[in-house]
Every structure is written in C-alpha cells, then in structure tokens.
Image (cartoon, rainbow, N blue to C red):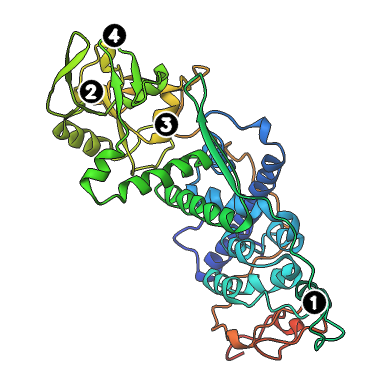
Amino acid sequence: MGGVSGDTLVSASADVAFVDGVFASTAGHLNAQHARLVSAAVWMLDNVGEWQGDGLWTPESYVRLQTGVSQATAAKVVAVAKRAGEFPHCIATMQRGELSLDQMTPVVKHAPSWCDKQMSGLATRLSVAQVAKTAREYPWDYDLSPTGQAAVAAEAGPASEDAGDSTIASAPPPTVPADEAWYRWDDNGRFHLHANLGHDSGSIIENALTDASDRLFHASVPDVDTADALVEVAERSLDAIESSDRRSRYRVNFHMQDNGDVTDSRSRPVTAAAADRITCNALVSPVKFANGVPVSVGRSQHIVPDRTRRLVEHRDTGCRVPGCESNRYIEVHHIIHWSKHGVTDTFNLICLCPKHHRLHHQGRLGVTGNADLTDGVEFTDRYGNVITETVARPWPPGAPPPPIEGTYEHPLGERLDFRWLYFNDDPNRPAPLGAVHSSQIVSRPEQAGS
C-alpha cells in the first residue's frame, strides 16, 4: 500500500503526499474488512438455524447487533452477501481492497451476473454515484444474444406454416384452477388465512405486501415479516374508510368482563396475551348491565389519556427496546399492566413498536423498571438474558492489519460519458448505446493534462 503502514497515524508535520497514502492504505484495509463481513454474512444465509431467534429474524439485525454498525451498513453487507456467488470477480476485488462496499452495493442491486468481470474492472474507477447510475440505468435487458433470441422465439410460439388457412382450429386453452381463498378461527383463538391464486391476482397481493413491508422497513420497524405486512395492508384499508358510519361499523371491538375475560364481537374468547396487548392502550366504552341486560353506555375514553400519551411519546421518541429505531406506529405499554393494579403514570408507561409489544405479551420479551429514568428499564429475552444496544465488543488490534493483496486507487473523479458505456457478454450482441468495445471500459484512461 504505497509504503504506508496499516497502523500509521497522521501527525501535524505530515505532508499531503503522506496523508494521501494514509487515506489509500486505510481505504484498502477497510474494503478488505468489509469483504470479511460479507463472507460472514454468506455463512449466515446458509446457516439460518444457527443464529436466528427472538427479535433476530433477519441477517441485517444480527450483523447490526454483532458489529455495532448502522442498519444501512448492515443492509449493504447482507445485500452483497446474497449475490456474492454471482459476482466472484467483484468479491475478489473487494477482498484485495480495491472495491468498496458502497461501490459494490448498487451493482448487486441492479446489475446482472454476466457483467461481473467487466464491472470489477470498471467500478473501481468510478465514484459511488457513477456506479449507481451505471448499474441502475444501463439497459441490461437489451438481450439479443442467441439465448435471448431463443427465449423470445419460445415465448412467441411456433409460426404457422399456412397463415392463410382459416380452417385450422386452434388448440383449446389449458384448464386453469379457479382462485380460492379462505380464513377461519381455531379453538385456540388463532386466525388462519389461506389463498391459492393465479399469477395475476397473486402478483397484486405480492406487490401490496412488498409495499407494506417496504413502508414498515423505512419506518424502522424491526424484523419485518409477512405477518407484519399483512396487518399493515389491513390497517391501511380500514384507515382509508371515509364515512364515519362505515368506519364505526368496521371498528374492531373487544368486550371485557368484570373478571378480566376478553371476547371479540362474536363472543369468541381472546387469549390472555392478546387481551393484555389490546387493553394496554385501548379506547374503553363502559357499559352498565342490569340482570344481564345492558342499560347504559358511558363516554368512551382512552386507557392512557391523550395528555399522558403525548408526554410519554415526547420522552421516549420511539420504541425503547435497545437496537430498535422505530419511531412510527408506536404503542404505549403499561410495564405493570393496569389489570394487575399498574398505574397509568409516566414511570409505568413506555413506548414500544408493534413488533416488540407483541413479543412482550407473548412472553418473549421482558420489560421491567422505571421508564422515567434514562437507564431505568431493563429488557430481557425469553431466556432472561439482558438485551443491550449492541453486543459488539471489538477486539483491540494487537498488531497492524495484514497487508492486502491489491492496491487501492481512488475513483478518477472524471465525468462519466454514459452514451459510450457498453457491456458485452456476447460477441453477437449489438451495442445499444454506442460502439465502444468492453475492453475499453475496463482500462484506466489517462488523467486530463497528463
């Protein structure tokens, strides 16, 4: 790395050439270490059962927990790991310290695997923005290779030998199964949903679930799964009801007896865990009965008054569970449930995201302490282990990092003329945007003025 040691620090007397060498050396080592994280994430994807558990359902959350990096960095590591096998040349370039994680991320998000070798030579010379533009906007689907032509021909079907013969009857279309969907409640109060749909209907539902998952992810809801996305789609549908009468008709109602038993609107019993979560921060409408007959209905009011809720939300600014960055769709939870004589005061109220709120009432997340104190609440998993913001315990380096095989060079910083950029995976493929051969785009152009 240009003669600069991996543990060299910059002093006040250093010149710019020395500082540039430190930048290059550090960037090369950083790229190589990111490649190590990618290799660890590849193992995680192949061995899910070894690390997955309560609150850690995604590889991104596990990488974040173990390393202390941000959600964005963890997402990049996992995104590269998912397609590492398709880009061996680019991964090798990362391991040599010549390609950064930020340069590699848009490649695995947008580019096809056949450009791996050419991209490994080009991406190191481009800025992150230029790599992203290339990977995102290049017409990768411009496929006129023999394989692509064969696929187009297969999709078009065989040509008729006598197109003018109208007496030739076409074959009847194949029988397609009818769409079906059903739902039911079991004896344990669990809701079951099943759907067997065709490609058209299935694609609509898949896109709706994908959009809901994306919304929850960008709202920093942790470990979003299909169940979360399905509930989000349903809640958005109910929230879109404009008519107050219709909204009231489809409001989800639960009924609590004096003994604490909870049933739904059809008198089906609700499990204790679900009942505790529902009644944590619900809208209560007291009903007075006489001889089993309702005789009066009181004014509806929140279990947690609006003024108290605003104070708690301002104090917590989001879900208080360590490592959770969710600050939307927040629910206010009683640390000691009000049905167990827990008071509705700020020290006994804490903000949780729907995911962690559900885990708590399922017995998989412990919450104890005084919420008014900065470090007054302790969170534990189902085994009683204390959950902290991160378990990352970086090992102090006992020696400089080992030398890397490659030599890092910063991006050229020149203008990218996108019109003449061309990847060629087949000699017979015509250039869609220009006539520059692929060998020209992987060579390092001369610096201006040299």
Where does the image place residue 417, in percent across and percent down from the top left? 58, 86
Which residue bears the numbered disc 1?
Answer: 153
Task: Give the CA distance from mark 4 to mark 1.
Answer: 71 Å
Task: Give the CA distance from mark 1 to mark 2.
Answer: 69 Å
Q: Give the number of the disc on residue 259.
A: 4
Is label 2 in a helix, a strand or a loop? helix
Local crowd size for mark 3, using a 10 Å CA cut-off: few (<14), some (14–19), many (≥20): many
Q: Nearer the viewer, residue 329 or 401?
A: 329
Q: Give the number of the disc on residue 347.
A: 2
Is label 1 in a helix, a strand or a loop? helix
Q: Is residue 400 left or right of residue 182?
A: right
Q: Residue drawn 54% across and 50% down?
A: 75
**Amino acid type, label 3:** His
Q: Is residue 376 left or right of residue 23?
A: left
Query: Is residue 436 visible in the rendered structure shown here?
Result: yes
**Amino acid type, label 4:** Asn
Is label 4 in a helix, a strand or a loop? loop
Answer with mark 4 or mark 1, whichever residue precedes in sequence. 1
Q: Are marks 1 and 2 in contact (CB under 8 Å)?
A: no
Q: Residue furthest front?
A: 167
Q: How many marks?
A: 4
Which residue bears the numbered disc 3?
Answer: 356
